[in-house]
Image (cartoon, helix red, strand yellow):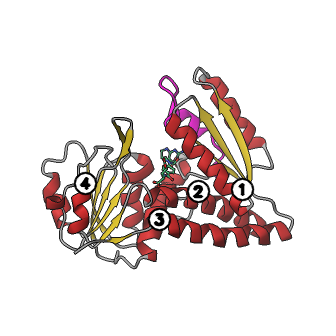
Amino acid sequence: MTAQILDGKATAAEIRADLTTRVAALRDRGVSVGLGTVLVGDDPGSHSYVNMKHRDCAEVGIESIRRDLPADASQDDVERAVAELNADPACTGYIVQLPLPKGLDEQRVLERIDPLKDADGLHPISLGRLVLMQPGPLPCTPKGIVELLRRFDVPLRGAEVAVVGRGITVGRSLGLLLTRRTENATVTLCHTATRDLAAHTRRADIVVAAAGVPGLITADMVKPGAAVLDVGVSRVDGRLAGDVDAGVREVAGWVAPNPGGVGPMTRAMLLANVVEAAEAAARA
Ligand SMILES: Nc1nc2c(c(=O)[nH]1)N[C@@H](CN(C=O)c1ccc(C(=O)N[C@@H](CCC(=O)O)C(=O)O)cc1)CN2
C-alpha cells in the first residue's frame, strides 16, 4: 500500500481562491483587509515564511504591512511595533513571527497584541477561548491540520490521535481543537518525557508529528492505514528535514508530506483568520 498524499499545497491554493472572492466582496462594500507582520532578526526560515505570507496576501488582495526589526532590537522596540499595529486602522490583523531572538520576552510581546487583531490565535485571550470552546481566532497550524483532514475525508469523530510535541503553536493547541465537540477526537499528547512513544503512535488512527526530531516516526511505529502528518522542521546538513521517515508511506493510509503538506495550510489559515476578522467587523 502507498499512502494517499494530503496535498496541502493544492488545498491551500483552493482556499486562497475562495478568500480572493471574499476579499473582493469586502472591498465592494468599502472594507479593505490588511495583514501586518512583525519580524525581528535575521533567521532565514522566519524571513522566508514572512515573505511567503506577504506573497499570499498579494495574491488574494490583502494589503501588506511589514515591521522588520534588526536582530539587536530591544523589548521596547518590539512592543512599540506592536503598539503601532494595534493603532493602525489599515491593519485588520497581524502576527509576530516566532521565535523571537534570544533575550526577548515572547509572551510579554504576544500579550500586548490587541486580541481583536490577533491573526495567529496566540494571545492568551484567544487561547483561553480555545480552552473554553468559545469562538475566536485559532492558531494557524492546528486549524490548517483540521481543515486538511476534513477536505480529504479522514475520519475524525472518535478517532485516536497521537500528537507528538506539546508546543503552543502546534501540539497543545491541536489537542484542544481536536477534542472540541465539533471534532470529537480522542487525543494523546506525547512529549519528551513520554515513556513509550511507539506504543502511543501504533494505537493511533492519526499521528501528528511536531517534535522537530528528524525521522522520529518510522514505519514500525505506524498502524497500517493511519494518517500521518509531518509538521516537524529541522535542518540536517543544511537541508530541511521532517519528523517522518520516508518508509512511513508504505504503511500509512494518508501522509501529509513536509514540505507540501501542513506548511501551506498554516499560511492559508492565517489569511482565513484575517478575512474572518474583517467580515466579523463589517457585520458589527
Ligand atoms: N507567529 C507564528 N510564528 C510561527 C508559526 C506560526 O504559526 N505563527 N509557525 C511556524 C512557521 N510558519 C509560520 O510562520 C510556517 C511554516 C511553514 C510554512 C510553509 O509554507 N512551508 C512550506 C515550505 C517552505 C520552504 O520551502 O521553506 C511547506 O511546508 O511546503 C509556512 C509557515 C513557526 N513560527
Q: Foreground residue, 176 or 133?
A: 176
In the picture of the structure, the residue carrying the numbered disc 2 is 270
What is the crowding at mark 3: few (fewer than 14 residues within 10 Å), some, or many (at least 20)? Answer: many
Label of residue 58 in the image: 1
Q: Foreground residue, 125 or 33?
A: 33
Quadrant of image for the C terminus: bottom right
Asked if the residue under mark 4 is in contact with the one under mark 3, i.e. CB atoms within 8 Å, the reply is no
Whole-number angstrom distance, CA of label 3 to CA of label 2: 14 Å
In the picture of the structure, the residue carrying the numbered disc 3 is 8
Does the residue tagged 3 have its C-beta within 8 Å of any atom of ligand 1?
A: yes
**Mark closer to the chain start, 3 or 4:** 3
Does the residue tagged 2 have its C-beta within 8 Å of any atom of ligand 1?
A: yes
- What's drawn in magenta, residue-wise? 97-116
Residue sitting at x 38%, y 36%: 238
Does the residue tagged 1 have its C-beta within 8 Å of any atom of ligand 1?
A: no
**Mark closer to the chain start, 3 or 2:** 3
Residue sitting at x 25%, y 70%: 226
Label of residue 245 in the image: 4
What is the crowding at mark 1: few (fewer than 14 residues within 10 Å), some, or many (at least 20)? Answer: few
Which secondary structure, mark 3?
A: helix
Whether residue 17 sits left or right of residue 219 in the image: it is: right
Whole-number angstrom distance, CA of label 1 to CA of label 3: 20 Å
- The three-letter amino acid code for the residue at tag 4 is Asp
Asked if the residue under mark 2 is in contact with the one under mark 3, i.e. CB atoms within 8 Å, the reply is no
